[in-house]
Amino acid sequence: MKAYYFDNVEGDQRLPHHNPDLPPVGLQQLESCGVRYWYIPIDSDGNWEQAIDKVAEERSYKNRDIINVSKEGLGDQYEAKLKIFFAEHLHEDEEIRYILDGAGFFDIREPNKDQWIRVFVDQGDLLVVPAGIYHRFTLDEGNYIKAMRLFKEEPKWTPHNRSAETDSNPHRVTYLNSVQAQ
């Protein structure tokens, strides 16, 4: 995992968009936004599966599935799905992703500065994006990611695109109150 401020330069969303002149972003800063992170390397002994099970138990994740975001995996829906993933949105549930293969970027909207923090994730990264935070996702130039999605309840992925309505969404309000209380 590598995190930094998104440079806001126009161009391909799959590029790093990293300006080394911008201040660095550390894990503590991500945590202050409510984002949680673990590195759990994939090994041939299956220890990674036990580590995922432990996190799932600690955080009450009851269900999981595998998503393959690629041209081959999504077929004719590939371009449309990428546009949906990259639209600024929030969820009413945590978004939990454990990266099995490939790579991509989660852009997290920093609540107090209203700037994007770009989080590069690849194999072994487990990222928890809190309910109510504005964010978006895109692949990197490899155009492929395979991730395990974990859920507290039944698997669902319902984006609520940013609007005046989502600004007053109860999950958004709860999220903002939680990060201001830190």
Image (cartoon, rainbow, N blue to C red):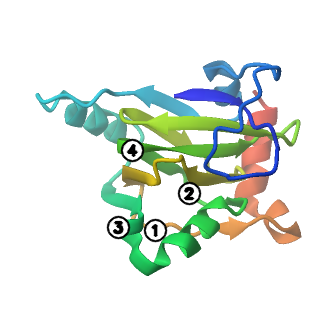
Give the secondary structure at mark 4: strand
Instruction: Say which of 39 and 18 sits in front.
Output: 18
Which quadrant of the figure has residue 75? bottom left
Q: Earlier in the sequence, mark 3 or mark 2?
A: 3
Marks 3 and 4 sit apart, C-alpha to C-alpha, by 13 Å
Q: Nearer the viewer, residue 71 or 25?
A: 71
Q: Position of residue 123 (x, y in %)?
A: 37, 36
State the residue at coordinates (50%, 37%): 121
Q: Is residue 149 above or below residue 122?
A: below
* Mark nearer the viewer, 4 or 1: 4
Q: Which residue is disc 4 drawn over?
A: 102
What amino acid is found at the position of numbered circle 1 in the picture?
Answer: Lys
Task: Return the disc, 4 or 2, that comes first in the chain's sequence.
Answer: 2
Please name the amino acid that badge 2 sits on: Asp
Q: Which residue is mark 2?
A: 93
Q: In the rendered image, which residue does mark 1 sit on?
A: 156
In the displayed orientation, state which residue is furthest to the bottom.
76
Q: Nearer the viewer, residue 155 or 13?
A: 13
